[in-house]
Amino acid sequence: MESNVKDKVVFASPKTEEERASVAGACVRKLGIEFPAVLDEFGNSTEQAYTGWPDRLYLIDSQGRVAYKSKPGPFGFKPDQLATALSRAVPAEAHTESRVNH
């Protein structure tokens, strides 16, 4: 909780979906999160299905399947494991094409 106070991301528990979205947006902005963030609904069905708490990294392949699921973070995040899963999920030609086209 100390880090939340230091980062100024302390909010009252939201009571509506709109409040929840506002709090999530403020956290993304204040913490400088630079990757897409999604918001679960109040029933937390996604969190329950994927055990995302406290936080995890997932790689979803082109068929919509979970290709990689990290251990709980941040200490469970292993960039080398994610890189290996990415290389399996994305053919080498796509890596080269992506770099050439961007």
Image (cartoon, rainbow, N blue to C red):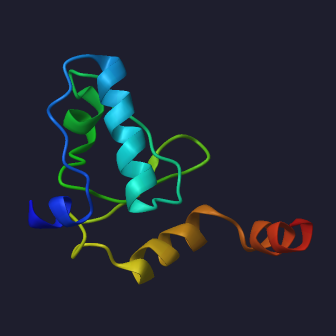
Question: Residue 72 occupies which quadrant of the picture?
Answer: bottom left
Q: In the rendering, at what x and y percent does residue 23 appear?
A: 32, 37
Residue plotted at (53% across, 60% down): 34
Q: In the rendering, at what x and y percent does residue 74 appear?
A: 25, 71
Quadrant (top left/top right/bottom left/bottom right) for the C terminus: bottom right
Q: Is residue 34 left or right of residue 73?
A: right
Compared to residue 29, the image places residue 46 above or below, namely above
Residue plotted at (31% across, 24% down): 19
Question: Residue 55 occupies which quadrant of the picture?
Answer: bottom left
Compared to residue 25, the image places residue 70 above or below, namely below
Disc tally is 0
Compared to residue 94, the image places residue 64 above or below, namely above
Q: In the rendering, at what x and y percent does residue 60 appear?
A: 50, 50
Q: Residue furthest left?
A: 1
Question: Residue 4 occupies which quadrant of the picture?
Answer: bottom left
Q: Is residue 66 left or right of residue 2?
A: right
* Residue 34 appears in the picture as rendered: yes
* Residue 67 appears in the picture as rendered: no
Quadrant (top left/top right/bottom left/bottom right) for the N terminus: bottom left
Residue plotted at (39% across, 56% down): 30
Q: Is residue 15 left or right of residue 33?
A: left
Q: Residue furthest right?
A: 101
